Image (tube, grey):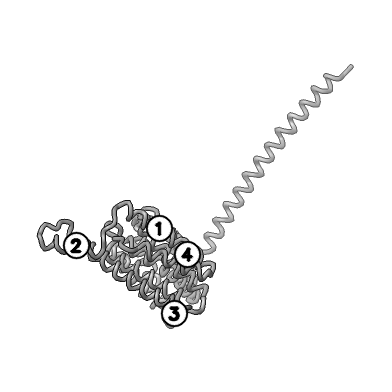
Amino acid sequence: MSRIWMKGTAAALILLAVMLIWSTAALAQPEENGSAGAAGKAGTSSASAPALSEQERSERLSQLESASERLYEHMQQGSTQEALADMESLIGALEGVTFKGLTSVEGIHALAETIMDTKETLARAEVRPEEWAFSSARLRLAVNSLLHPDKALWQQYYKVMADNLRQMNQARAGGKPAEVRKAFQALQDHYEVIRPAAVIRRPASEVNRFDSWLSYAGRLSNEQTWDEAALKGAIVQGEGALKGLFGRRGDEPVFLPITGFENPWYWSGLIGLWIVLALTYTGIRKYRASQTVSAVREKRREEDAHRYRL
């Protein structure tokens, strides 16, 4: 990595930090500035950072999204030079843009941290595919969450994380601590990918709730003396925390109850009964169909015999 690029990186990070702080201050300002002092402050801010028109702001945000998508593709492929250029374009698109009406102060901080983390990943001399894939995915999801509140990509992770939670529950019911830890680690990894996007879009209380649950469930799953009852209760709590994180309804099930482990013979017998009934019904229908076809053929043979008799 060249020193020139490193200096440019530092300057870009400083510019990004100043821009985000200014945007945060703009969010914190009241809507109405009636006093002369407020007008003077607004004039000073305008002089230091000229406000963009709505069309310019929209174009910058579109450039931001395009740059984040290109950066994601190039970092997934390990294309260093292209990724560096994409990062510069991304930071350039942010210059002078405010996030008022798009997200909260916490969301702005989450976006800034994600950009800086990705920048640091790019600055390392050694290309590590897993880190590049992880950081680029987090950044792309964060930008997408900022610009698409209704159909954000990170919402697709609900089914993935619900499946991780279901696997934890299955392993818990089957008495497999190692499988519980494996499923929990997968859940934690997926959450780390979407967390900035969730902070940008969801209330801080829901994010903090899931953070707390994750810490508690992680401690239970890694204990040497396994408390199965406590873990069972924690997984039930996790269902509600996961729904809250993704803004799902309270009556929407995350996974079906796992009753098969407690009485496997009952479920095996029930499934076998359904199979027998299905085969019996199919056999009866085939028998009736064959009888009908045979009867029709016999009738046609008699008719043909009379027709061709001299």
Of mark 4 and mark 1, the one earlier in the sequence is: 1
The residue located at (43%, 79%) in the rendering is 222
Mark 2–mark 3 Cα distance, whole angstroms, equals 39 Å
**Is residue 59 at least partly visible in the picture?**
yes
Residue 234's image quarter? Answer: bottom left
Secondary structure under the numbered disc 4 in the rendered image? helix
Mark 1 near mark 2, Cβ–Cβ under 8 Å? no
Of mark 4 and mark 3, the one earlier in the sequence is: 3
The residue located at (51%, 79%) in the rendering is 126
Residue 283: give x, y in percent of width and height: 66, 44
Mark 4–mark 1 Cα distance, whole angstroms, equals 14 Å
Residue 118's image quarter? Answer: bottom left
**Is residue 168 at least partly visible in the picture?**
no
Secondary structure under the numbered disc 3 in the rendered image? helix
Residue 63 numbered tag: 1
Mark 4, other Cα within 10 Å: few <14 / some 14–19 / many ≥20: many
- Residue placed under numbered mark 2 in the picture: 29
Of mark 4 and mark 2, the one earlier in the sequence is: 2
Mark 3, other Cα within 10 Å: few <14 / some 14–19 / many ≥20: few
* Amino acid type, residue under disc 2 in the picture: Gln
Mark 4 near mark 2, Cβ–Cβ under 8 Å? no
